[in-house]
Image (cartoon, rainbow, N blue to C red):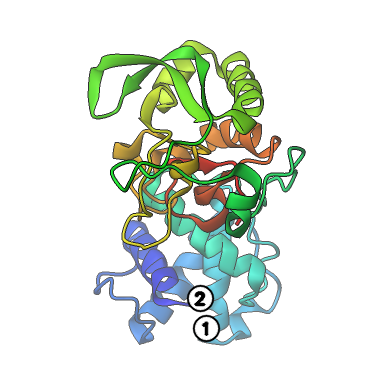
Amino acid sequence: MNKAAIRVVQHKLRELGHYTGKVDGERGPRVNAAVRKGIRDLPGSLPSGWRTWSDKRVFIAFLQKYCLDEGINAGRVDGWWGPQTAWAAEALEEKLIIGFVHAWRDVKPIEANPNKWPRQKDLVSYYGPHGKANFGPTPPPPLVRVPSPWPLKISWNKSQIRRHFLVHEKVADSLAEVLERIHEHYGLAEIQRLGFDLFGGDYNARKMRGGTKWSTHSWGIAIDFDPERNQLKWSRDRANLAHPDCADFWEAWEKQGWVSLGRLRNFDWMHVQAARL
């Protein structure tokens, strides 16, 4: 049990009218007394003998009942803090903050790799040299334009429309298939609502932001979407593309072996790449 879970319960006890103290994440005598009063105000039954439980166990039972009342599966109301209760407490906090629980909290990204995309350390052997714009006369990778089934608005100048992605020729067919699946599944109105039409970048010969290694963008094997609402360090509690409505968008990429850093590492939700980590 952590302070965040205690604060959630303190807020609920205030709402129920049983607690007027600070919401400070500390479980003291006033909180324990309020929990014993408030636990019967929550829907659902309690095991026989619960009144003889320790204060801590009753507190956890209160949290479990609260989660269940919010539609979050906390397992049995038994007053024990296990993996299921820990997950439920985190999910409850997330729901109270942003209004929903992410659909894929327990879902691992699809691990398919039908195109046999290489790991990042093997990019040169698979794709050849990366581009070095402004770093010498080296020619760019073999790039092709893949038409977008929907118009793309440049994220930093939304009045400017782009109708293609510029990518390495080895990923072109796969990209075209992904885009068609997304377009067929969502349609233009949903694509625009969710921000899939906000173009944030494709081929760009540059180093990783804040690093010394070359970005996957330098090979033309990465694309960014809606960077303003999916900033580099934002995790799923803030990133727009982490919304459950975007799950099918990411699965379309993953079925072709592309990797979402958001889905896999919970940062840089704008970014998807044809390279394994």
Q: Residue at x 36, y 42 (%)?
A: 230
Q: Is residue 152 visible?
A: yes
Circles 1 and 2: CB atoms closer than 8 Å: yes
Q: Is residue 27 left or right of residue 87?
A: left
Q: Position of residue 74 (x, y in %)?
A: 63, 61
Count numbered badges in the picture. 2
Classify mark 2: helix, strand or loop: helix
Q: Residue at x 62, y 32 (%)?
A: 171
- Please state which of residues 187 and 60 is positioned toward the viewer in this rendering: 187
- Please state which of residues 1 and 54 is positioned toward the viewer in this rendering: 1
Q: Is residue 40 visible?
A: no
The kind of residue on which mark 2 rests is Phe
Q: Position of residue 53 (x, y in %)?
A: 61, 84
Q: Position of residue 209 (x, y in %)?
A: 33, 55
- Quarter of the figure with residue 140: top left
Question: CA–CA distance between discs 1 and 2?
Answer: 5 Å
Above or below 182: residue 48? below
Above or below 239: residue 186? above
Residue that mark 2 sits on: 59
The kind of residue on which mark 1 rests is Lys
Classify mark 1: helix, strand or loop: helix
Q: Position of residue 166 (x, y in %)?
A: 46, 26
Residue that mark 1 sits on: 56
- Please state which of residues 43 and 163 is positioned toward the viewer in this rendering: 163
- Please state which of residues 267 and 62 is positioned toward the viewer in this rendering: 267
Q: Residue at x 57, y 54 (%)?
A: 264
